Image (tube, rainbow, N blue to C red):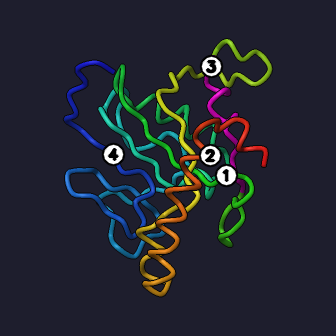
Amino acid sequence: MGNLSIEKKLNLGSGEFKKAGFINVDYYSVSEPDVRHDLNQFPYLFDDNDFDLIEAYHVLEHLKNPFSVVKELHRIGKQNALIIMRVPHFSRGFTHAEHKRGFDVSFPFSFDSNFKRGYQGTSLELVELKLHWFAQPELKDTVLPKLIFYISRVTETIFDFIANLSPYLCSRF
């Protein structure tokens, strides 16, 4: 990553969580994104090598073909762009009625050309992989009683520490 200068930022699948300084893209959102686009339709409405930073938080699990989405993110990201994806683990993948899948820690292998059995033809460098027990706290803060929310945040700290000692091993339990 080195001296990455972040000039143009994309918030893909922004939903109700629009971000200042980003181009916010969604299709079904009632929060009026900057760009309304069905993310299952390719190509996206952006030029090649357009973005320095692309964030896709809890959107891939809603889409028909996550491999095609990642290929498209690679296309619209500049060389050495930072692409941050957050997805639900397969053990929690179907906790929302519109989820089409959950993911495993092996998902990034599909973008490593050395992974011959599942390489998807788009190369990305995995910079960091982390497991989080309490996903989307910004959403849960609006639906859980405050005491339960704060107890869950403390519990998350403990679980996350243990899980991230070995995410590949922990993912199996």
**Going from the N terminus, do you reach mark 1 or mark 2 first?**
1
Residue 106, located in which quarter of the rendered image? top right
Q: Is residue 152 above or below residue 156?
A: below
**Going from the N terminus, do you reach mark 2 or mark 4 first?**
4
Position of 23 with respect to 137 (left or right) is left
| Labels 1, 2: front one | 2
Q: Which residues are magenta?
A: 101-112
What separation in Å lies between label 2 and label 4 (alpha carbons)?
29 Å
What separation in Å lies between label 1 and label 2 (alpha carbons)?
12 Å
Disc 2 secondary structure class: helix
> Who's the residue at 55% across and 31% down the image?
71
- Residue 22 position, x and y percent, is 26, 50
- Which numbered tag is attached to residue 39? none
> Who's the residue at 64% across and 35% down the image?
166
- Which numbered tag is attached to residue 89? 1
- Which numbered tag is attached to residue 10? 4
Crowding at dot 2, Cα within 10 Å, few <14 / some 14-19 / many 20+, comes out as some
- Per the image, the residue denoted by label 2 is 163
